[in-house]
Image (tube, grey):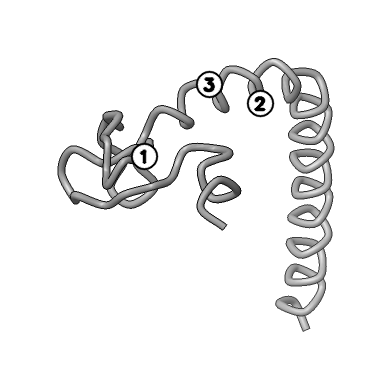
C-alpha cells in the first residue's frame, strides 16, 4: 500500500513542475520572440537550406540564383521564377 500514494504524489509534483517550466518558457518566448525572429531570419536567409553552409550568388543560364558552397544546390532568388514563366 505504501507505493501507490508515493506514485501519485510523484506524478502530481512532476505535473506541477512541467506546468511551471512550460509557463516560464512561454513567457520568455513571448518576450524575446520578435527580436529573435528578425535576427535569425537575417542570419538563416544567407545559409543553405540543405547543409547550412554559406550561400553564394550564381548566374545560372542567365538567371540569378543562390547556391550552397558544399552541396551545390541551387535556390532561385525571389522574383526570378515569375520572370521565367
Say whether marks 2 and 1 touch (CB < 8 Å).
no
Q: Nearer the viewer, residue 69 or 79?
A: 79
- Earlier-in-chain disc, 2 versus 1: 2
Q: CA distance from mark 2 to mark 1?
A: 25 Å
Q: In the figure, 72 relative to 27: above or below?
A: below
- Earlier-in-chain disc, 2 versus 3: 2
Q: Which mark is residue 37?
A: 2
Instruction: Judge depth for marks 1 and 3 and give the one in front.
Output: 1
- Image coordinates of residue 75 in percent, x first then y, are 39, 47
Question: Position of 9 compared to 3: left or right?
Answer: right
Write down the residue under mark 1: 65
Residue 76: name its quadrant.
top left
Q: In the figure, 10 relative to 52: above or below?
A: below
The residue sitting at 37% across, 41% down in the picture is 63
Q: Which mark is residue 42?
A: 3
Circle 3 Cα neighbour tier, 10 Å, few/some/many (<14 / 14–19 / ≥20)? few
Amino acid at each position: 500500500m505504501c507505493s501507490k500514494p508515493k506514485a501519485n504524489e510523484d506524478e502530481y509534483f512532476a505535473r506541477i513542475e512541467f506546468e511551471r517550466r512550460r509557463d516560464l518558457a512561454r513567457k520568455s518566448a513571448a518576450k524575446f520572440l520578435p527580436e529573435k525572429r528578425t535576427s535569425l531570419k537575417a542570419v538563416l536567409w544567407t545559409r543553405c537550406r540543405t547543409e547550412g553552409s554559406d550561400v553564394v550568388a550564381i548566374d545560372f543560364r542567365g538567371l540569378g540564383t543562390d547556391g550552397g558552397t558544399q552541396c551545390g544546390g541551387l535556390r532561385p532568388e525571389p522574383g526570378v521564377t515569375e520572370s521565367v514563366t
